[in-house]
Amino acid sequence: MDRTQVIAALAILLFGAFLLGFLTHWVVTRLSRVSHRDLDELDKMAEELHEAEIQRDEAVTERHRVEHEAHRKLVQTEAELRAAMDGLRDARAEAADLRAFISEQNLRQP
């Protein structure tokens, strides 16, 4: 094999490798290509996810507001209960004093 034949064989071999690489790249590109429909679906999913996150944030804010309002009402009700219990204690003490006074008056009168 002389020099010209080696160069020609090498050129054919390199051209074959180039064609094989080109065809492989073309096949991989065709198989992994994303269609417009898939991109539209991904965009739609992203928008739905964004809306769901907004709704979640609004729900968390509403929950905090409701919890705060419930806590405020609980504190107010507990304060009213303490006031009512204090009033009841005072009324019982006054009733006991009046009973003692009436019993004392009944004992003094023959």
Image: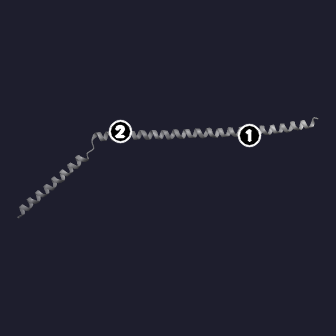
- Look at mark 2 in the image and give the residue it sits on: 44
From this view, report whether residue 21 is shown above or below residue 49.
below
- The residue mark sitting in front, 2 or 1, is 1
Q: Quadrant of the N terminus?
A: bottom left
What percent of the width, then of the height, locates residue 32? 26, 47
Separation of residues labelled 2 and 1 (CA atoms): 62 Å
Task: Classify residue 52 as left or right of residue 108.
Answer: left
- Residue pictured at 30% horizontal, 41% vertical: 38
Outermost residue on the bottom side: it is 1
**Furthest residue in direction right, as rendered:** 110
Q: x and y percent of residue 97 in the render? A: 83, 39
- 70 vs 20, left or right, is right
Tell me the residue at 62%/38% (across/down).
Answer: 73
Residue 34 placement (x, y as % from top left): 27, 44
* Of 47 and 95, the residue lying toward us: 95
How many other residues sit within 10 Å of disc 2, few (<14), some (14-19) or many (≥20)?
Answer: few
